[in-house]
Image (cartoon, helix red, strand yellow):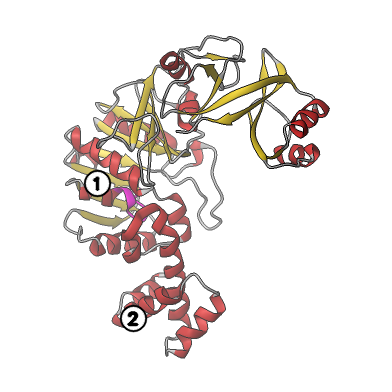
Amino acid sequence: MDLEQFAALRTPEGSAALDAAARVAGGDPLTAAAALRSAGVPAGLAAAALTQAELRRRAAGKFGPAARGMFLTRTGLEQATRGVVARRRAERLRATGVATLADLGCGLGADALAAARAGIRVYGVEADPLTAAMAAANAEAAGLADLFTVECGDATAFDVSRVDGVFCDPARRRAGTGRRIFDPNAYSPPWDFVTGLAERVPHTVVKVAPGLDHALIPAGAEAEWVSVDGDLVEAALWCGALAEVPRRATLLREKEGRLPGTSAGAEARAAQLTGSGDAEAPVGRPRRFLYDPDPAVVRAHLVAELAGDLDATLGDPSIAYLYGEARPTPFARCLEITDVLPFSLKRLRALLRERRVGRVEILKRGSALEPERLRRDLKLAGGEAASLVLTRVAGAPTVLIGRPVPA
């Protein structure tokens, strides 16, 4: 899509095309396109409307009902922050006294809209003209145009003295190709500018990739990893006055119901674990229950803190499986272990056949085995189910057999 096509979608005819496209989205693309053309929608407008309708359908998982009125690009949607994460970040910013915020590299406006809904005045800067125009349209559609305004320009040229907080989500995909950028020095804005923001604005938050090397975390910053419904979705650096602890793992729930191991109430869909990020957990032999920590806990290097909460131990100092007794926790999935065996395909196949196990889930850490190939080699048959954990214990290849403990 280009600016001309986007402008066409903003006309009354474009709005009608979007409504028509929404009614046929999700089915066969050729059938949908034919339906719009038969309704008199020009081919170019029909294609643009159908693209928006499909992107809005996909965006519902990130933004909920608000996605129905948003304008989106494929790359922008992939990079946009999930609604539940953006809301929590905005609440934290507002709670620390941030009243005006610069969103440098605002993209389609997901974070800026959440901040505006929290009552923060947001100044968005976006280098791409089409994306900037869409962000402004999204603010208008949300009824937040008085709190979130967008300028198309260079984020590094924005006068940050105008605000008391900065949020920066540097582009981590190459323009034109959409390929991921893994070197922070190739981000846009560049990494040295991003990390230098904390020296200029006392309330600075930087969104980064979950795979960020801990060595790149600026001194004194809080590094937070966030998972939603068990999926690791992002990391953020909280700098200056916003830094509260060295490392934080935040678990959020978007689905209905509360996180396992939490009490009922307003915080039942969120849990946080904090610590230094450099503690070491004790090592011992496997016990009755295995804990598979949430990926946010693992990436934040907070497995030792979780081990302390659970009075648990590692089976191997380099593998993030914990062993202990049954204790409720939102920070790990729990399995009850029935067998701990040195890995042997022949012995494992015989044992599962003896127990008539026909269905297995396979977890692995520290094992080179391919789960699907192992599943085929086991030649399973029977009506029972089991969980297999491929790992190492004291350096030795090991398989554990167990079953999930209900949350």
Identify the magenta region: 105-111
Q: Is residue 359 above or below residue 56?
A: above
Q: How many marks?
A: 2
Q: Where, by quadrant of the figure, is residue 138 drawn?
A: bottom left
Identity of the residue drawn at 47% across and 87% down: 37
Task: Decide: few, some or many residues near mark 2? Use Cα within 10 Å; few <14, some 14-19, many ≥20.
Answer: some
Q: CA distance from mark 1 to mark 2?
A: 31 Å
Quarter of the image where the N terminus is located: bottom left
Left or right: 179 as drawn, with respect to 242: right
Residue to which mark 1 is pinned: 115
Q: Secondary structure at mark 2?
A: helix
Residue to which mark 2 is pinned: 16
Amino acid type, mark 1: Ala
Task: Decide: few, some or many residues near mark 1? Use Cα within 10 Å; few <14, some 14-19, many ≥20.
Answer: many
Residue 334 picture location, percent across and down: 51, 27
Front in this rendered view, residue 312 or 118: 312
Residue 254 picture location, percent across and down: 37, 45
Residue 57 picture location, percent across and down: 43, 64
Q: Which mark is residue 198?
A: none
Q: Is residue 254 above or below residue 193?
A: below
Report the residue that reaches farthest toward the right. Answer: 346
